[in-house]
Amino acid sequence: MRYTEYGKTGKKVSVVGFGGLRFDLEKSNEDHAELIKYAYEKGINYFDTAPGYCDDRSEDIYGIAFRDMIKEGKTDFYVSTKGMPETYDTAEKAIEAVKKSIERLGVKKINFYHVWCVRKMEHYELAMKKGGQYEGLLKCKEEGLIDHIVFSSHQEGNEVIKVLDENKFEGVTLGINILNFPYRIKGAQHAVDNGYGVVAMNPLNGGTIPAHNKELSFLAKDGETATEAALRFNIGIPQINISLVGFSKKQDIDDACRIADENIDYSQQDIDEIESKIGENMNAICSGCGYCRVCPKEINTAAYMLFYNEKQMFKKNDEDMTNLLLGTRYGNYTTGSKVKASECVSCGKCEKECTQHLPIIDRLKEISKWEEDVKKIK
């Protein structure tokens, strides 16, 4: 495993991190804990989670693994978790959240605590208000409950730079991958240039890349898949310290560690060459994070947006999309929705939560037309 320094913190972190958002909920917490311990043995020492991940099981899963590891004297790993400024809008709430996460994770302190999911400047401003979340996190740091205060952002590059230049944080977690990096890398470059740590989430775009290995093969070199190319890219570019990967089996961990060990660094020429292959529409694809699933009508907006990726990524027309809805391969995207896209009431709650700032309402209107066409065909 390769290691790098996280900003100016002095902490040596693995270039591959274990992301705790995508555990298979059909498996037990204990099964997942074994996977975490396996990742540690393979050299991964950065573990990321958050309250609410995986039906609020993620922190508990890590807690099982960490307690076992600590009993065995294995303490040379780093823990990352998070708290949203909207949820913890006072210093008292923020302090309580930190203490609760520490208890669940079974550790003495949080190494990297994120002001979580900053999607626009008002979220940052909310965290920084007098008596707000940041003030509480500073107190936790003074008490030794937190090592480093960082933030996770879904903003465009210039806003990320604006937050970093306030000098309140020591690092940032961004959604960067081989598909969207032209639109996000400016903030990461500024962070690295100014001594901040940079963590990349969604290196496989929430599973979109593995699901389209064939269609995205133009990104890969001979003998590798698009998935391998995506991991190699995130691990190899100098603007990223850690790439978070959600693992479901040991082979996934082995593959990621192998790519890290191959130690292939990307030059600016390499990065420019990849950028030339990527269409302009790749920034507006759904990453499958699921934050949009707040629909009062219980429309499965996340599933529908993943389906819409087919049009966004590959420029398919209405007829193509209707035919995809007819195909069994894509049935799983929408059958989980209790109601269809046409029942959207345009309340805007999903768009407010969307980390990619997607026009969900307009896309649902398009999808509802395709679904109507399917009825006519049937």
Image (cartoon, rainbow, N blue to C red):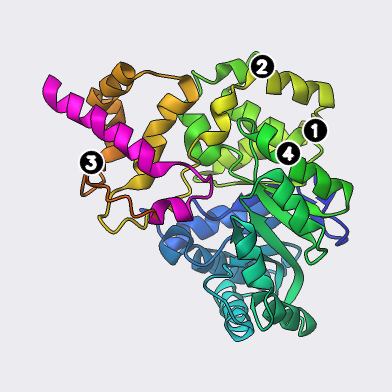
Q: Nearer the viewer, residue 352 or 327?
A: 352
Q: Say which of marks 3 and 2 sits in front.
A: 3
Spatial CA span between label 3 and label 2: 42 Å
Which label is found at residue 221? 2
Q: Is residue 169 above or below residue 233?
A: below
Locate residue 231 relative to residue 61 in the image: left or right.
Answer: right
Q: Is residue 40 above or below residue 167?
A: above
Identify the residue position indicated by label 3 in the image.
342
Residue appearing at x 56%, y 76% in the figure = 88
**Can residue 1 be seen in the rendering of this structure?**
no
| Three-letter residue code for mark 3 | Ser
Identify the residue position indicated by label 1 in the image.
263
Q: Say which of marks 4 and 1 sits in front.
A: 4
Q: Nearer the viewer, residue 328 or 258?
A: 328
Q: Position of residue 227 (x, y in %)?
A: 57, 29
State which tag comes first along the sequence, 3 or 2.
2
| Three-letter residue code for mark 4 | Ile
| Three-letter residue code for mark 2 | Lys
Locate residue 42 relative to residue 170 in the image: left or right.
Answer: left
Span colored in magenta:
349-378
Q: Nearer the viewer, residue 31 or 128?
A: 128
Residue appearing at x 73%, y 39% in the figure = 185
Identify the residue position indicated by label 4 in the image.
185
Displayed quadrant of residue 167 = bottom right
Q: Is residue 213 above or below residue 235?
A: above
